[in-house]
Image (cartoon, rainbow, N blue to C red):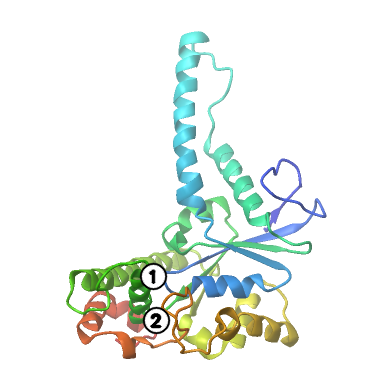
Amino acid sequence: MPARLSGVGLPWGWRPESTSRIVNIFFVCGAPKSGTTWVQRILDEHPEVCCSGEGHFIERFTAPLSKVINSYNQQMSMETEQVYEGKPVYAQVDQAEFDATCRVFMMGRMASRAAPGVRWLGDKTPRYTHQLAQLNRLFPEAKIIHIVRDPRDVAVSRLGHSNRVGVKDVFTPGTTNHDAEVRAAASGWTEAVSAVNAFARHHPGLVYELRYRDLSEDAMAETDRLFRFLGAEADRALLEQVTRATSFEVLTGRKRGEEDGRSYFRKGLADDWKNRLHPDAERIIRESCGELMRQKGFAA
């Protein structure tokens, strides 16, 4: 069942106009440089959907909090033995209480920028590909949106990002930095896609996977499928509005294919690897990702 917020005990930003609002939770993930930010922008344009970005709730909140709780339980156990002769005043914080605390925090954070009428709350964090089991324990009904991009384009995008932040020689084939970035992109893509595949096999119906290439070629059709997966209604007028507002041209002020190496949205093209990737770099990627590439429809 979707999460039901009572409006009580939610101190981290939840401001419902109704205490009985039904809220549906979802998460967006994908290997780095695969287009997760674009998917976030698309979803966030729907008036009933609020999709925020980079909450990193698992590694930056629940994982550190678990260490705090474990330490707290240990200290309380010592106090019980030393002061109360083994008869505890407070029970240990158990998994259910820990999970409830995490849920309240995460829902409050995701809801902190939600407009009235929002019924779907989501967060986009690429790294969730490796944390789906934890998210599923906290929100068993939460839907997962996974975007997959050709790993060769992922590598080109990663090289552009590394160049933008000052890594030297990343576009010079054969250099240490270039080869390291290409190998990191390939291994990161394989690990992320494999992790989502494994989760999807054990949780049928919870994962929707789309390809960056398909989103680029027919944004309106893919946007329609995204909203249908969530259960959010969208007529043609809304789909046209969302597609227009999240087009490369509107987001960047440039035509698709016009490159700005300083921009987060660098070029907006699928298959740009054919123009930018050295044959040796492509070979590295095919050796690492070949079988998964074929599974996802990327000719290896």
- Quick one: 184 or 292, which is closer to the camera? 184
Q: Reading the chain from its start, which is encountered first: label 2 or label 1?
A: 1
Label pair 2/1, CB-CB below 8 angstroms = yes
Q: Which mark is residue 193?
A: 1
Kind of residue at badge 2? Lys
Image coordinates for residue 23, horizontal then vertical, percent:
70, 59
Q: Tag 2: Cα neighbours inside 10 Å, few (<14), some, or many (≥20)? A: some
Tell me the residue that label 2 is attached to.
296
Residue 85, compared with residue 269, is above or below; it is above
Under tag 2, what secondary structure?
loop
Residue at image location 48% in from the left, 51% down from the top: 58
Residue 229 in view in this figure: no
Cα distance between the residues tagged 2 and 1: 9 Å
- Judge left or right: residue 197 versus residue 155: right
Residue at image location 78% in from the left, 61% down from the top: 116
Under tag 1, what secondary structure?
helix
Q: Which mark is residue 205?
A: none
